[in-house]
Amino acid sequence: MTATGIGASVKRVEDFRFLTGRGRYTDDIERPNQTYAWILRSPHAHALITSIDTKKAAAAPGVVAVFTGADLEAAGVGGLPCGWQVHSKDGAPMAEPPHPPLAQGKVRHVGDQVAVVVAETREQARDAAELIDVGYEALPPVLDMESALAGKSLVHDGAARNLCYDWHIGDKDAADAAFAKAAHVTAIDIVNNRLIPNAMEPRAAIGDYDTATGEYTLYTTSQNPHVIRLLMGAFVLHIPEHKLRVVAPDVGGGFGSKIYHYAEEAIVTWAAGKLRRPVKWTAERSESFVSDCHGRDHVTRAELAMDKDGRFLGLKVSTKANMGAYLSTFAPCVPTYLYATLLAGVYTTPQIYCQVQAIFTNTVPVDAYRGAGRPEATYLLERLVDRAARETGLDQVDIRRRNFIPNDAFPYQTPVALQYDSGDYGATLDQAMGAALVDGFAKRKAEAGKRGKRRGLGYSTYIEACGIAPSAVVGSLGARAGLFESAEVRVHPTGSVTVFTGSHSHGQGHETTFAQLVSGALGIPMENVDIVHGDTGKIAYGMGTYGSRSLAVGGEAIMRALGRITDKAKKIAAHILEASESDIELKDGQFRVAGTDRALGFAEVALAAYVPHKFPHETLEPGLDETAFYDPANFTFPGGCHICEVEIDPETGEVEVVAFTAVDDVGRVINPMIVEGQVHGGVVQGIGQALLESCIYDEDGQLLTGSCMDYTMPRAANVPNFSVGTHTTLCRHNSLGVKGCGEVGAIGSPPAVINAIVDALWDVGVRDISMPATSQKVWQAIQSARAPMAAE
Amino acid sequence: MTYTVSMSVNGKAVKGEVEGRTLLVQFIRENLRLTGTHVGCDTSQCGACVVHVNGTSVKSCTLLAVQAEGADITTIEGLAKGDELHPMQAAFRENHGLQCGYCTPGMVMSAIDLVKENPNPTEREVREWLEGNLCRCTGYHNIVKSIEAGAKAMRGG
Ligand code: FES
Ligand code: FES
């Protein structure tokens, strides 16, 4: 390992600019002659728009223009497209209602876009928006999924019973047969609470139009600028790619919420063209709450069949998944191909059947949020396994070990479509148990008991699937996009290197990790390497960053381009050194004739490529610049074990996470410091889901948790320091052996936390606790568990 | 109606025209174009906007620009001496105390004020002090480590 190569905890390249206030986020950008947009949003969950009068607003000071849905329709602006089509059990395609950027005749959630005011200042735009007079005729809101299916009130006329699709996977008859043989069946009802992502940087977008070239530029807070260019250009605004540039500069966190193509992006781009002036929009946080896609929101019944030895025979799952009011870009695949396909977990359950009903409601659209489907699968499985252990008297660890997929079973084909390539679930469990000092737990529990506190230990042994691929397979499952990645490695004449990657960094540190790959492969210092991302004007193509795919897909694309660079450079070096190509080796930045001291530096070969005086012109073209598109053969499958230790004050219901241990198998680790940071962040989002965060709508469809005051996100004092480790098995189908680390924390942690709480309170009589396990909820659970006992 | 405000920002006298409702953070970002100070919320909960006003950390979204008349303001841009990072900035870099960087300016400005008040804070004290700063990326672990290291460096090693 070199100081900057694979495996080194190199300090981040990007930090200097962020630490000195020189980051450049979308809202930091100002275009000459810029105007400001303010979006008027629906105050109703569900209403017909009977009239819109914009006259007063249009005449207000500083106002440049006011647009409504009618203006967009007249201009031929299309609806926001959905990127994944799921088919129902009966073969029918999902209901896919239109999603206009500005409402057409009806609003479907609080926060739905109704009109836009463009003015000289943000304040003027905002003031004028208050002068728009909208007539609404309120309709009964559709909120709870169960009553949505009754279909009395319809979110979309085209979606009977408010049903988007009714999908299934697995062999139902075989699963039923397995249950018929069972010695024991454990059943639970699980709610996966709805979350609001809240990346710290609110969304923003600036549309710009160049009157000289006819080119549009959109600056936006996106995780995948090329995807936005494709969706917005092809489906919404009908602007060809060569006239549309999308730039996603520094982005302040995404966690999924900045994958999607949002209405505001199309609105500012279209308005910039129409007005011939730049148009800037920046969300206030309260707008983020009602317009950024939410996450999770599943209601599930799950049953696990076991034989008399606690071996799993079958799993049956029935889930209702909330889609919200419209289908967001990738919403349909989250509760299907990213959820039900993960229900084998790390276990050898031979028969699995899962059905999923996706349902429209008058709430903000729901789409992928850190983990996307996989946290939902993991939570239900790990809660179910925990419960099964308690019902059958098996130990928590024992029941898991008994059912783990053994190391010699890989590649392992699950009954729900996936084929896992590698893993060692026993090893991650052992290592986590050691790090969590499980042996001393009984003593710690007794000590806490003396102080009147209850301690609990909770486990989660999980798997996830990252780097969703290959394109041909996801296409057959309904994806309307490919899921490859591109990279261009451009070696400059004096030997420095620029890498253009289709991955996007919004906190992940790609500028560092990717530069390590280059430095390691070419033997040149990291300072000589620049990583460029986030600009369709510079990068050939890209699918962006989500699903922990950047290193496994984007990094591998870079490795392939680097391979082509070294192949060509060796040929050039062989020619100059008058040696055979097969004798040239690249080491420490030197191309050397093996076993001699004849060598050329990397920069000398680079120069020869661009000043090709002595150059093998018969076989090579000048230049040293290679592009690769990489489409993986399979998903990658990180897994691991999380152990949470909690202490509960039964008098107040307060839960303290006193220790949290994560041992993850993320494949080969390029930068351990960055991997640990990703795990910390993911774990805290998971603890947030388990203990604090919950999106709540009232019976009128008003969002009660619509600000940072009402929606509780973890703060520093809510969480402990973590013990984080890795145990590596290599991914078998990429050259780096990497799997992905961005989501493991958020996937593995919630069931560990809740299982720990149940463990602490089982003896009190508490059998279940739903997320978020707030002090109030925990206290109530203790009270109601105690009450019948007191009566006995 | 507009007002003229003048104050010192990062050691430089500045002046500008603002509305009565203009927040200090808007004045800093929009009038002065010092965009290192961020806006993460509209309820004074996140701390992305923390600056020093007369030497004390303040959420610049809680103050009107006119209220800062005559004040001495330091923003994240005013900490480093040229390319030499302030010890707290350096500690964040050394300990991976930032990911997306959005909360970072506020975290660093808050941390420096903590160390001024309490030069040797415990982990608990650091966590309690950060009550007004949200980070969605780091899980706080490395921010706390950074601040402990930064405090040590500010004490002189
Ligand atoms: S912007 Fe000032 S506290 Fe959030
Ligand atoms: S580093 Fe992204 S919010 Fe803190």
Image (tube, coloured by chain):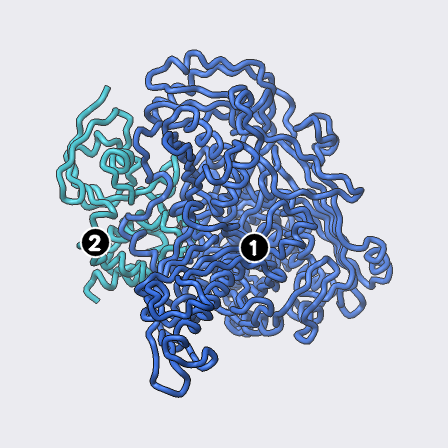
Chain colours: A blue, B cyan
Q: State the separation of the CA atoms marked 1 and 2.
A: 41 Å
Q: Secondary structure at mark 2?
A: loop
The residue where tag 2 is placed is: B80
- Residue A449 rendering spot, x and y as whole percentages: 53, 63
Determine whether, in the image, residue A107 is placed left or right of residue A582.
right
Residue sitting at the far bottom:
A595
- Residue A422 rendering spot, x and y as whole percentages: 62, 70
The residue where tag 1 is placed is: A484
* Occupied quadrant, residue A83: top right
- Density class for disc 1 (Cα within 10 Å; few <14, some 14-19, many ≥20) is many
Identity, as a three-letter code, of the amino acid under mark 1: Phe
Q: Residue at x 44, y 19 (%)?
A: A66
What is the quadrant of the C terminus of chain B in the image?
bottom left
- Residue A318 rendering spot, x and y as whole percentages: 74, 48
Disc ID at residue A278 = none
Q: Nearer the viewer, residue A495 or A194?
A: A495
Q: Residue at x 52, y 29 (%)?
A: A111
Q: Nearer the viewer, residue A13 or A318?
A: A13
Q: Residue at x 37, y 58 (%)?
A: A498
Residue B77's place in the image compared with A469, above or below, is above
* Occupied quadrant, residue B99: bottom left
Q: Is residue A408 visible?
A: yes
Identity, as a three-letter code, of the amino acid under mark 2: Ala
Marks counted in the figure total: 2
Residue B28's place in the image compared with A36, above or below, is below
What is the quadrant of the N terminus of chain B in the image?
top left
- Residue A156 rendering spot, x and y as whole percentages: 67, 28
Q: Nearer the viewer, residue A601 or A301?
A: A601
Determine whether, in the image, residue A88 is placed left or right of residue A45.
right
Q: Secondary structure at mark 1?
A: loop
Which of the chains bears the disc numbered 1? A
Residue sitting at the far front:
A618
